[in-house]
Amino acid sequence: MTVTLWGRNRDPDSLDAVVFLKEHGVRPDRMLDIDRQPPEPREWAQISLGLDSLVDAIDRRHPEFPRLFHDLDRLEEKTIAMRLHEHRDLIRAPILLTPRGAVAGFGERKWRGFLEVRKGRG
């Protein structure tokens, strides 16, 4: 399995994630624009396993979240993936998929823990 980073052009979190990965010597095999090339169904399945749930990949701040995910507690992962694929602006970017798992939404502390890198060292 390869390392894939999905982000958005000119999105501050996506740009911060790219800088963070470079600083720590992580070079994704693929870097894709999530709005143009979102995860394929098999990749959503891998992301789901890596996140424990695709709920973590949803941008809950998006104005359409309540309408599209009002029934979130009853949705299957496959349905969540389908809705995210259809409504890409609801995907919480960036998403990093690695052989070890996945992480959605950039936060330096969260990504440090996920990648097991120490502050001040690559």
Image (tube, rainbow, N blue to C red):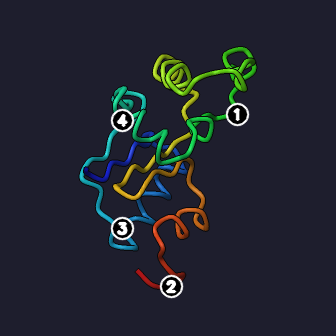
Closer to the N terminus: mark 4 or mark 2?
A: 4
Q: Mark 1 points at which residue?
A: 60
Return the residue at label 3. Answer: 22
Mark 1 or 4, nearer chain start: 4
Mark toward the start of the polypeptide (1 vs 2): 1
Q: Name the spot of residue 36 as percent of width and height, x first.
A: 36, 27
**Amino acid beneath label 2:** Gly
**SS for dot 4:** helix
The one nearer the camera, 39 or 61, is 39
* Disc 2 to disc 3, C-alpha distance: 13 Å
Amino acid type at image mark 1 = Arg
Tell me if 74 is positioned left or right of 107 in this view.
right
Q: Which residue is drawn at 40% across and 40% down?
A: 46
Answer few, some or many: residues within 10 Å of disc 1's Cα (few below 14, many 20 plus, some between 14 and 19).
Answer: some
> In this orientation, which residue lies closer to the viewer: 38 or 75?
75
Q: What element carries label 2?
A: loop
- In the picture as drawn, the residue positioned furthest to the bottom comes out as 120
Position of 89 relative to 1 (above/below): above
Residue type of the residue flagged with mark 3: Lys
Task: Identify the mark nearer the N-term, 3 or 1.
Answer: 3
Which callout, 1 or 4, points to the residue nearer the camera?
4
Q: Nearer the viewer, mark 3 or mark 1?
A: 1
**Which residue bears the numbered disc 4?**
43
Quarter of the image where one finds residue 63: top right
The part of the image, by quadrant, that contains residue 7 is top left
SS class of the residue under badge 1?
Answer: loop
Is the residue 116 above or below the residue 94 in the image?
Answer: below
In the rendered image, which residue does mark 2 sit on?
A: 120
Q: Residues under labels 4 and 3: Cα distance?
A: 23 Å
